[in-house]
């Protein structure tokens, strides 16, 4: 390859101008563009048209140049959502011409210039741009499966199979750096190339070859992947590996950024498990190539700057990666692909489904139910996927606890690292306790400034009740009909969903139910439903005076067990005003709805334009780790500080706080609230289209990724279709999609998936639901 670089053409700008006129009849100004072993010129006509004149290395085969042209034509025709240059023929209609200079003969081609900004120039590529890169690469690789050309089957030094070419150069690198590169090459040695898929690949999606369009960061999209001079028939995954190697340069969180590209790629052109497992090794191998070849470059051709462009950045990235446990990026990439993060051997079940069911029935309290007619034995989760003992994958559309995704590696790492350092109670000082409280408070409006950390949603509501009682010196409590607030004695008393249901004891004297503000089947359905329903709250508050006055109004900010009810506008504003006027405090139960699920807001209560006096949190807060929180005002907290200590053995322990911090970090870094908004809105629109074809679908409602589909047998009488809803949930499960039902008539299908739910998941859900609904008798 030294010879190839050394034999790079050296024609002058004047020559380029002359060849353009002679061969293409173009009168242009020329400027040089960078290239490792060819020579490229930007040509501009007086009219502003722009072209790239590509003068190939004198060693380049005509065959290979033909391959490049054919590849451009092929991809331009394929379903690849990118721009491709046009190949401009000469005056003699040749797609490839030949020029002769004093020292050699070169092939030249003329391509149209594509506008755009280099990816490398975008300092902080956002989630959308990273996803668009993943999609672009996925589409290109998927299309190229159908492309073949003899010239691609070549031995090429930048083909990652040929790492020995680079490895032989490690002697040119200083000691400490050499050891680092050797360690990564040792990993490359283990790659089983026979287990990888092969195809023609671009092989050089470096950040200077990727063009981006869009004027603002949120509009940035990959518009083109340029330069087909490194095309080779090799392992398909190498194409992605090369792109990741350059993408990771100069990034604060290189693996996190790479994972976003991998996740989007996976949706278009799914990787095999072994490809995912090899991806990181291949990406670092490319970096090692780069630094080794740059070392030789510096020795042989010190004036060719091309290879040095990314050399310093490659070294600093390699050093950064050296400090990361080698298996970590693969875990992150497996997660990004929704694959089990741990290897399959670990997941082998030790008992059959029937054995587990029998043992469970014998040993566990019989009041515990199990989902589905044929219960699932789930052994593993990743992202929005669950896997059963037989290895079947299920799309989880209902688990709002695994908020940032099942087994998210950052959450898992936060938990295991802190668990291996320290886990104690909150009577010691600890950074995480303070840091987590600060960060949680920062998500909430004033005056919600005081935190109590607990272990569950029930415990959070239980404490909220105590706070309200201490502050008001009253007991009476208002609650929305059909609501569920927890499993403790007081919370069952406060949950019509339970006390009005089987085995329930009815409404306790200190509890006052207000109507479920349901605009679909409730008593108020018009534009003023919010204020109408709030009158019910006023009435209940008045009634509570007979028992000494209202202490609190408990309300979910969107009612989940009540059937995914979205509160009508003005409801909470008017209700809170009534409760406060009656001397009570307002508790927002955000156990189901918080942490960005609403899409437009981080907290669901914000969609109602209110500030509660107490907010309770649970489920998503720890992504599956038992954690809960109560946040209130300094005044209410002061009323509660009456001399009796509030101590909680586990609440706020360092492990829980580390997990809570990781969850907040992931929501921010992966822009999950925005994802909830975009995917949720899309899903709601698609479900509403289903409603047009299926009379059974009476209502589709929701905010962000908190959605409900209410099934009715008759759209006039609203006769609930509970049995049909149960059947549909069973059928969807058979198709690998997990849903559940709720609402007073069990006829509402709940959709509240992990927030990593994608557009593709939404499509899968809707098309399966469409098929299953078609099976229903009309
Ligand atoms: C709205 C609401 N609040 C509180 C709880 C109780 O939370 P946990 O089960 O964590 O005690 C639940 C549980 O389903 C809930 O849905």
Image: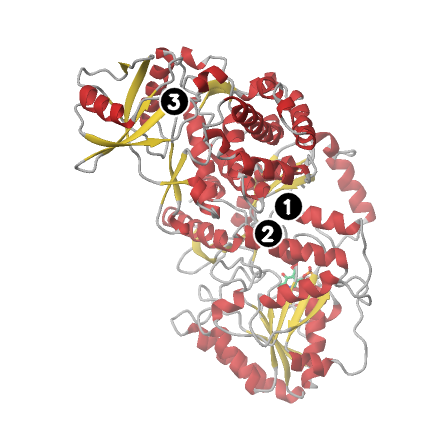
Specify which label sits upstream in the sequence, 3 or 1. 3
Residue that badge 1 annotates:
408
Residue behind mark 3: 38
Quadrant assignment for the C terminus = top left
Q: Nearer the viewer, residue 73 or 746?
A: 73
Q: Is residue 776 visible?
A: no
Is ligand 1 closer than 8 angstroms to the Cβ of mark 3? no
| x and y percentages locating residue 643 in the rendered image | 81, 82
Question: Neighbour class for label 1 at 10 Å: few (<14), some, many (≥20)?
Answer: many
Ligand 1 shows up in which quadrant of the image?
A: bottom right
Assess whether mark 1 and mark 3 are in contact (beta carbons under 8 angstroms): no
Q: In the drawing, does residue 689 fall left or right of residue 365? A: left
Q: Is residue 480 above or below residue 455?
A: below
Residue visible at 55% across and 22% down in the picture: 160
Cβ atoms at labels 2 and 1 below 8 Å apart: yes
- First along the sequence among labels 3 and 2: 3
Q: Nearer the viewer, residue 715 or 309?
A: 309
Residue holding disc 2: 666
For marks 2 and 1, give the one nearer the viewer: 2
The x and y percentages for residue 87 are 27, 24
Real-space Cα separation, disc 2 to disc 1, in angstroms:
9 Å
Of marks 2 and 1, which one's residue comes earlier in the chain?
1
Q: Determine the CA span between mark 3 and mark 2.
A: 43 Å
Question: Do labels 3 and 2 touch, CB within 8 Å?
Answer: no
The image quarter containing residue 162 is top right
- How many labels were placed on the picture? 3
Label of residue 647 in the image: none
Judging from the image, the colouring scheme is secondary structure
Q: Quadrant of residue 485?
A: bottom right
Q: Is residue 559 above or below residue 479?
A: above
């Amino acid at each position: 390859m030294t010879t190839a670089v050394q034999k790079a053409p050296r024609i002058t700008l004047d020559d380029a101008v002359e060849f353009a006129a002679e061969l293409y009849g173009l009168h242009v100004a020329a400027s040089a563009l960078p290239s490792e072993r060819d020579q490229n010129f930007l040509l501009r006509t007086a009219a502003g048209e722009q072209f790239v004149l590509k003068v190939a290395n004198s060693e380049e085969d005509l065959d290979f140049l033909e391959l490049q042209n054919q590849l451009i034509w092929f991809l331009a025709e394929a379903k690849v959502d990118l721009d491709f240059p046009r190949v401009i023929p000469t005056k003699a209609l040749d797609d490839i011409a030949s020029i002769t200079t004093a020292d050699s003969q070169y092939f030249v081609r003329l391509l149209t210039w594509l506008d755009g900004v280099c990816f490398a120039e975008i300092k902080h590529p956002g989630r959308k741009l990273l996803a668009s890169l993943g999609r672009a690469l996925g589409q290109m690789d998927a299309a190229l499966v159908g492309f073949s050309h003899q010239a691609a089957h070549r031995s090429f030094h930048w083909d990652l199979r040929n790492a020995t070419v680079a490895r032989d150069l490690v002697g040119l690198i200083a000691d400490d750096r050499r050891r680092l590169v050797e360690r990564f090459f040792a990993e490359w040695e283990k790659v089983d190339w026979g287990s990888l898929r092969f195809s023609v690949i671009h092989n050089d999606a470096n950040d200077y070859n990727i063009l981006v369009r869009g004027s603002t960061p949120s509009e940035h999209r990959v518009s083109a992947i340029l330069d087909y001079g490194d095309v080779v028939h090799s392992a398909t995954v190498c194409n992605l590996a090369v792109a990741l190697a350059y993408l990771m340069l100069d990034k604060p969180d290189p693996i996190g950024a790479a994972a976003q590209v991998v996740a989007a790629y996976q949706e278009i052109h799914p990787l095999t498990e072994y490809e995912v497992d090899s991806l990181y090794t291949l990406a670092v191998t490319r970096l090692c190539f780069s630094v080794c070849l740059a070392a030789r470059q510096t020795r042989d051709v010190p004036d060719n700057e091309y290879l040095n462009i990314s050399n310093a950045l490659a070294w600093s990235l390699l050093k950064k990666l050296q400090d990361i446990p080698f298996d970590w990026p693969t875990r992150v990439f497996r997660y990004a692909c929704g694959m089990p993060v741990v290897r399959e051997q670990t997941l082998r079940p030790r008992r059959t489904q029937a054995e587990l069911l029998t043992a469970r029935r014998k040993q566990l309290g019989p009041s515990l139910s199990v989902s589905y007619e044929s219960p699932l034995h789930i052994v593993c989760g990743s992202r929005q996927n669950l896997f059963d003992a037989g290895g079947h994958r299920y799309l989880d559309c209902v688990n709002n606890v695994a908020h940032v995704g099942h087994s998210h590696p950052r959450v898992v790492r936060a938990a295991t690292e802190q668990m291996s350092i320290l886990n104690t109670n909150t009577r010691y000082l600890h950074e995480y306790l303070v840091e987590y409280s600060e960060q949680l408070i920062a998500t909430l409006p004033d005056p919600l400034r005081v935190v109590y950390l607990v272990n569950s949603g029930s415990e959070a509501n239980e404490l909220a009740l105590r706070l309200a009682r201490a502050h008001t010196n009253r007991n009476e409590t208002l609650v929305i009909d059909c609501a569920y607030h927890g499993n403790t004695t007081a919370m069952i008393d406060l949950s019509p969903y339970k006390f009005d249901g089987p085995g329930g004891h009815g409404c306790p004297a200190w509890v006052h139910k207000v109507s479920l503000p349901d605009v679909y089947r409730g008593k108020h359905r018009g534009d003023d439903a919010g204020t109408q329903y709030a009158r019910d709250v006023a009435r209940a508050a008045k009634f509570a005076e007979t028992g000494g006055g209202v202490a609190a109004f408990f309300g979910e900010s969107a009612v989940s067990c009540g059937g995914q009810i979205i509160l009508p506008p003005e409801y909470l504003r008017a209700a809170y005003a009534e409760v406060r006027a009656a001397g009570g405090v307002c508790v927002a139960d955000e156990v189901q709805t918080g942490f960005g699920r609403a899409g437009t807001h981080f907290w669901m209560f914000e969609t109602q334009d209110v500030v509660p006096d107490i907010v309770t949190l649970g489920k998503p807060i720890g992504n599956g780790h038992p954690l809960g929180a109560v946040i209130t005002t300094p005044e209410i907290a002061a009323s509660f500080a009456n001399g009796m200590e509030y101590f909680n053995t586990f609440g706020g322990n360092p492990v829980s706080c580390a997990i809570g911090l990781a969850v907040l970090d992931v929501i921010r870094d992966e822009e999950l609230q925005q994802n909830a908004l975009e995917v949720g809105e899309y899903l709601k629109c698609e479900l509403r289209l289903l409603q047009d074809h299926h009379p059974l679908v009476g209502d589709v409602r929701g905010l962000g990724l908190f959605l409900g589909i209410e099934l009715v047998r008759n759209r006039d009488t609203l006769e609930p279709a509970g049995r049909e809803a149960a059947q549909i949930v069973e059928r969807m499960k058979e198709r690998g999609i997990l849903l559940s039902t709720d609402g007073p008539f069990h006829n509402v299908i709940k959709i509240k998936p992990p927030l990593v739910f994608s557009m593709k998941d939404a499509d899968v859900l809707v098309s399966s639901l469409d098929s299953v609904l078609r099976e229903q008798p009309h």
